[in-house]
Image: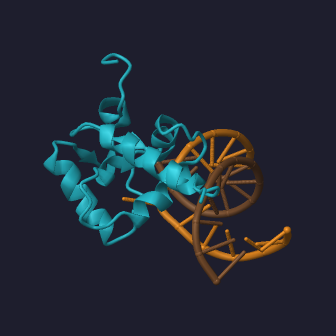
Chain colours: A cyan, B orange, C brown
Amino acid sequence: MRKIKSEANDATSRICLALAQVPSGRVVTYGRLAELAGLPRAARLVGQTLRKLPKDTRLPWHRVLNAQGKISLPEPGAQRQMKRLEAEGITLMNGKVDLGIYLWPQEKEL
DNA sequence: TCCATGACATCTG
DNA sequence: ACAGATGCCATGG
């Protein structure tokens, strides 16, 4: 039997694959991750996908921030995310991350 | 099929 | 810098 409606599965895997590429100590925005996954303008889909991830996933879900460099995850998750970020050496100034420094990928390094 | 929802993004005042 | 309005894309009822 063919799976004609595997559009979501496909999108999900691509998002997960892209997410797995994000190195420790760096971050990406939802929109950026969507692009890397080949799904431009599907930022919200990224959010829904991440929300479904099992709590014991090894994917770096905590390295995903919104375009403002702030955590979009509502409490109590935000607390855990911030902790994980700082654990990787990412500094949150006034509740936000400096994307000019931590955003991945950086042109220079590319 | 239509409508509501969401870990977003961008523009405007 | 901040809040509200609008646009986007896929999912689920």
In the rendered image of this protein, does residue A48 appear above or below residue A16? below
Looking at the figure, which quarter contains the C terminus of chain A? top left
Query: At x 36% / y 30%, what residue is drawn?
Result: A100
- Quadrant of res A6: bottom right
- Quadrant of res B9: top right
Looking at this view, is A59 or B7 the one in front? A59
Query: At x 37% / y 36%, what residue is drawn?
Result: A99
Query: At x 32% / y 53%, what residue is drawn?
Result: A61
A84 relative to A54 in the view: left or right? left
Q: Residue A104: x percent and y percent?
A: 35, 32
Query: At x 19% / y 57%, what residue is drawn?
Result: A83
In the rendered image of this protein, does residue A88 appear above or below residue C2? above
A50 relative to A91 in the view: left or right? right
Q: Residue A73: x percent and y percent?
A: 39, 62
C12 relative to A20 in the view: left or right? right
Looking at this view, is A53 or C2 the one in front? A53
In the rendered image of this protein, does residue A22 appear above or below residue A108? below
Looking at the figure, which quarter contains the N terminus of chain A? bottom right
Q: Residue A63: x percent and y percent?
A: 31, 47
A28 relative to A47 in the view: left or right? left
The total number of labels drawn is: 0
Q: Residue A106: x percent and y percent?
A: 35, 24
Answer whether residue A94 is visible to the viewer in this image: no
Looking at this view, is A8 or A40 the one in front? A8
Q: Residue furthest front?
A: A1
Answer whether residue A75 is visible to the viewer in this image: yes
